[in-house]
Image: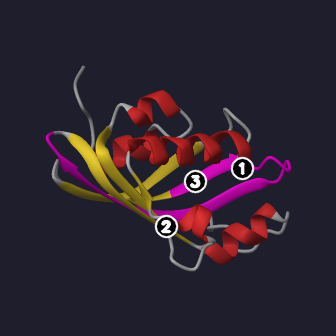
Amino acid sequence: MTKTGSPARRLVEAFGDCPALAAMYTEDVTWRLNHSLPANIAGPHVGKDAVCAFNEAVFTKIYEPGSVTVEILDELGDEASSVVRFVFHATSRRGNPYDVEYVLFAKTTGGLIHEVVELLDSHGSIEQHQGNTVGVPPTV
């Protein structure tokens, strides 16, 4: 199987597929989000088991399974260190549409991801989970 795109791109394109995500991680992977978010979301989530549990919670408890898609806006980097800017589209478990812009950085060791830093419009995210359209990115 040929790898296409950067590690960051491959990671976000696998969102929602927890086994595919798990296959991309080192045993000591770390995943962190905005420090202003609650600790159970912001992390850092350290170690493959913790990161996989976090992914599972996100893609089964926060969003409707199967509803996640991503729209890549920008991509930079190489196999060692990469970043993507993307719009995360989904339906929340409350049934609300979710369309928030994110930036995700990924660093790899030996072809596997060992560090993820995910940044987002946290205000827009909170509002959209409440059913409000605050922070919806404009269509181009």
Residue 20 covered by magenta stretch: no
Q: What segment is highlighted magenta in the picture? A: 87-110
Q: CA distance from mark 1 to mark 2?
A: 15 Å
Q: Are marks 3 and 2 in contact (CB under 8 Å)?
A: no
Going from the N terminus, do you reach mark 1 or mark 2 first? 2
Going from the N terminus, do you reach mark 1 or mark 3 first? 1
- Check disc 1 and report the residue beneath it: 62
Instruction: Locate residue 128 relative to residue 117 in the image: left or right.
Output: right
- Name which residue type carries label 2: Leu
Q: Secondary structure at mark 3?
A: strand
- Name which residue type carries label 1: Ile
Q: Indicate which label's residue lies in the foreground, 3 or 2.
A: 2
Q: CA distance from mark 3 to mark 2?
A: 15 Å
The percent coordinates of residue 80 (x first, y second) are 16, 52
Instruction: Locate residue 72 relative to residue 76 in the image: left or right.
Output: right
Q: Are marks 1 and 3 in contact (CB under 8 Å)?
A: no
Q: Is residue 122 visible?
A: yes
* Most frequent secondary structure within the magenta stretch: strand
- Name which residue type carries label 3: Phe
Image quarter where the C terminus lies is: bottom right
- Check disc 3 and report the residue beneath it: 88
The percent coordinates of residue 9 (x first, y second) are 35, 47
Q: Quadrant of residue 37?
A: bottom right
The percent coordinates of residue 130 (x first, y second) are 84, 65
Taking the spot 35% from the left edge, 41% from the top edge, the residue there is 10
Going from the N terminus, do you reach mark 3 or mark 2 first? 2
The percent coordinates of residue 6 (x first, y second) are 26, 46
Q: Are marks 1 and 2 in contact (CB under 8 Å)?
A: no
- Check disc 2 and report the residue beneath it: 33
